Amino acid sequence: MAYPRTRFPQTGDGENSKDKPQSPEQEKEKKIDEEAEDRSAPSGKVVYRAVVKEADDELHRSGAALFWSGLAAGLSMGFSLVGEAILRANLPDEPWRPLVAKIGYSFGFLIVILGRQQLFTENTLTPMLPLMTRKDAHTFWKVMRLWGITLLANLIGALAVAAALTQTDALSAEVRHAMREIGTLAMEPDWLTTMIRGIFAGWLIAILVWMLPASDSARFWVILLMTWLVGVGEFAHIIAGSIETFGLAWSGYASWGEVLGGYVLPTLLGNIIGGVTLVAGLNHAQVVGGESK
């Protein structure tokens, strides 16, 4: 995506400057200014407007388009569990194993974000910015519609892929055992701890969305590193974590009540708080506050 940049003042600008010959020093300064302009990162206002524009596009998508994109994202996120479980099953049980195995956790996010599929945690940031700007009922209901359809579709996809991974022999017994270990670790913390971990996950994923417009060719590495941090920090992500814990419920290692009430609910609340309050709200205040001065 191309972003508009602020034009630097250049030596020789002014009335009829085009008609005046420039000295070698002026030409050199002009080239330096042009190179500096090309190398400068887009400002916070430019990134903000890019995110708002994308959010407006999402708010105007049809319900069917949102649902199918969200379903695809829920299914694709299964590869976060697959990638991590394969690495975990094939690495020695050493203290450093999680640092390497969690690279696999990023696989689903890479597929979803680079593939432009609809993931709920991205939508804790983007639709909130138009809502904070307009503050009207029409935008509020559009945001709620986007959230509801995306979350429902993501969870349906997560439920389906968790069943496919745990109730079939598509993966080896060792990998399925590693998936159970991952799900068990996700279920260990209490309700409040899970919610707090969800806040950090929502915070990081929403920051990731904010960073993408300025990342250009580094998008792959930005996604990989930020989502690896979510995984290695054992922060709770509503879709990736739901696949891990749904697998336990499908296999009979946890009840559906324990999974939905003890993991899904606190994680969902935490992701929303982290994405909306700590990122959307602060970045909105930063840009709008700067414009009002």
Image (cartoon, helix red, strand yellow):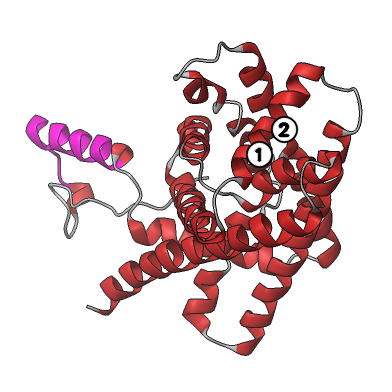
Horizontally, is 262 left or right of 6 in the view? right
Horizontally, is 36 left or right of 171 in the view? left
The residue at the point 82 percent across, 58 percent down is 67
Name the amino acid type tagged 2.
Arg
Residue 34 x %, y %: 26, 39
Q: Is residue 29 magenta?
A: yes
Q: Is residue 231 magenta?
A: no
Residue 60 x %, y %: 71, 69
Element on which disc 1 rests:
helix
The residue at the point 35 percent across, 49 percent down is 42
**Which residue in the structure is indicated by mark 1?**
184
Q: Please report contact status of discs 1 and 2: CB closer than 8 Å, yes or no.
A: yes
Q: Is the C terminus in the top left, top right, bottom left or bottom right quadrant?
A: bottom left
Relative height, residue 127 to residue 197 (above, below): below
Number of marks in the rendered image: 2
Visible in this render: residue 53? no
Main SS type for the magenta part?
Answer: helix
Relative height, residue 123 to residue 251 (above, below): below
Residue 255 x %, y %: 79, 52
Residue 134 x %, y %: 52, 83
Residue range highlighted in magenta = 20-37
Horizontally, is 292 left or right of 14 in the view? right
**Which residue in the structure is indicated by mark 2?**
180
